[in-house]
Image: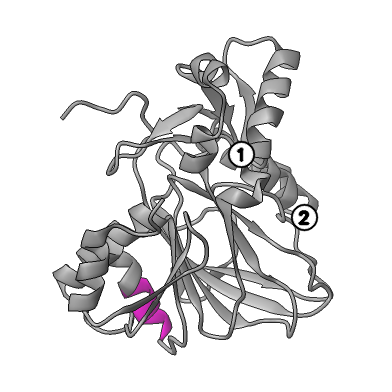
Amino acid sequence: MSPLSEQALLKATDLNFDLLHLSPTIGTEVHGIDIGADLDSETIDFLSNLLVERKVIFFRDQDISVEQHIAFGRKFGEVEIHPFTPNLEGHPEVVCLNNDRDKPPSINLWHSDVTWRQEPSLGSILRALEIPEVGGDTLFANMEDAYESLDDKTKQQIENLYAVHDNENFLTGLFTKGIAADEVQRLREQYPPVTHPVVRTHPISGKKSLYVNTVFTRHIVDMDPDESQRLLEKLYLTAWIPDHQCRFRWRKNSFTFWDNRAAQHYAAADYWPEIRRMQRVTVIGDKPQYPPKIV
């Protein structure tokens, strides 16, 4: 399989970008770009297409402001305000992901972001502000490849299944941090469980991918609980296969932009108790569909 289409390679050359692939099927560093600049529509279209094709793209040495980070996210759609995680003061669009000796990392599990929403995110743009000398990498998995790796019998079995997703992990965390029980209950009612297809069709490429994850998926609709758990565990394991993955070593002012519709990620917690400080801007997506909507 070619790591990138000929059309994308020609466009990168036209724009004077250098591309470095981290694996054959997922992950590409883009060099020669300033994401804090007022990028034109041709560049944004190229990055959007590259994101769909490669699932996650990386940018190094981007010493930009918070406002420029937000503005870059808005080039790809409306940005969300996360209701549970700490936001940057004065910039509610920016999620702060800070870990140190007193705050160990807690979500070092394979997942897609906010699948407990009716319309989960298109993607997230994550920045490294302070990183440990060693460790703290982020791994990404191509869930289209994960789907294709399944045998035909399993593909047929999951073709029209739906699964329930919820945010109970976040809510439990809020309760243990001292948030009042009535406030936690209010959030639980505001963001009830949702159902999404187990196999999602990408709204741009039309490709199928697995859309269940260990953090937010609870069970498969209308399936015996034990059978549901066995099937989900089998599907979860596909993200763990190194053939579907790439691994990104952070440096200060590195950025990643991943396609949350077709990729999962895992933040390695091997650096604790060292400090790791990150900031994230997330672009709102659409409701997962299978089969795709006919326009």
Depth check: give the residue in front, 70 or 45. Answer: 45
Dot 2 falls on a residue whose secondary structure is loop
The amino acid beneath tag 2 is Gly
Q: Is residue 220 above or below residue 12?
A: above
Q: Position of residue 114 (x, y in %)?
A: 52, 46
Q: Position of residue 288 (x, y in %)?
A: 39, 34
Q: Is residue 94 visible?
A: no
Q: Is residue 189 above or below residue 253?
A: above
Disc 2: CA contacts within 10 A as few (<14), some (14-19) or many (>=20): few
Q: How is the image coloured?
A: one colour
In percent of the image, x 64 and y 77: which residue is there?
277
Dot 1 falls on a residue whose secondary structure is loop
Q: Is residue 193 left or right of residue 286?
A: right
Q: Which region shows up in magenta? A: 65-71
Q: Position of residue 170 (x, y in %)?
A: 66, 47
The residue beneath circle 2 is: 178
The amino acid beneath tag 1 is Asn
In percent of the image, x 69 and y 77: which residue is there?
276
Q: Residue furthest front?
A: 1
Quarter in which the C terminus is drawn: top left
The chief SS type of the magenta part is helix
